[in-house]
Amino acid sequence: MINNKLRLELLVIKENEIYELDGLKFSNSIFLRPIIDEQDILNYEEFLGSVIVLNQLVQSTNNSGKYLIFTCACGIADDSGWELVNVTKTEDSLFWKFTRNNRQYSYKFELSEYIDQIKLIQKKNRKL
């Protein structure tokens, strides 16, 4: 399996701005956008209205297991049918496997790049 390229970006919504997501209005907020192979996967039709949970991304770097990486904009994963992502960590790779709307997704990331992206986004977030 070829490695997928992960880039994490912040979407910053200022106090005087309104951002609507899944029927909810947000201002003065920060959203994490996962860009995989130059595609913002949260723009995929089956991912619309979803958000990424940063602390679950961080935890997934420690051990293999199941993590709530994606959730509904309201914060309740079950509202939009999200299930846990099966994460497998090896010495140099990290794998995501999950099902969304009866479709299987599988990604393989280089572990060091995955961790670097998380550290970079945490640093950017602290500066805001």
Image (cartoon, rainbow, N blue to C red):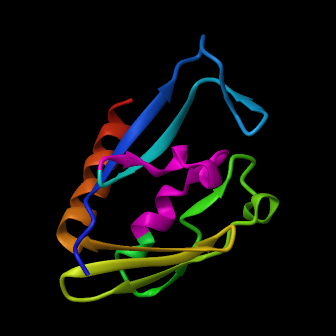
Q: Quadrant of residue 88?
A: bottom left
Q: Position of residue 120 (x, y in %)?
A: 25, 48
Give the camera-side residue of 126 and 64.
64
At 18% across and 69% down in the image, what residue appears? 112
Give the camera-side residue of 21 and 48.
48
**The N terminus sits in image quarter:** bottom left
The tally of labels here is 0
Q: Position of residue 65 (x, y in %)?
A: 49, 87
Q: Quadrant of residue 101?
A: bottom right
At 23% across and 71% down in the image, what residue appears? 3
Q: Is residue 44 above or below residue 65?
A: above
Let me know if residue 40 is in the magenta part.
yes
Q: Is residue 31 toward the left or the right of residue 117 in the image?
A: right
Q: Is residue 35 above or below residue 55?
A: above
Q: Position of residue 50 (x, y in %)?
A: 63, 50
Let me know if residue 66 is in the magenta part.
no
Give the camera-side residue of 33 and 1.
1
Q: Is residue 94 above or below residue 48?
A: below
At 21% across and 72% down in the image, what residue appears? 110
**The C terminus sits in image quarter:** top left
Give the camera-side residue of 56 and 71.
71
Q: Position of residue 5 (x, y in %)?
A: 25, 59
Which residues fall within the magenta stretch? 38-58
Q: Is residue 103 toward the left or the right of residue 8 in the image?
A: right
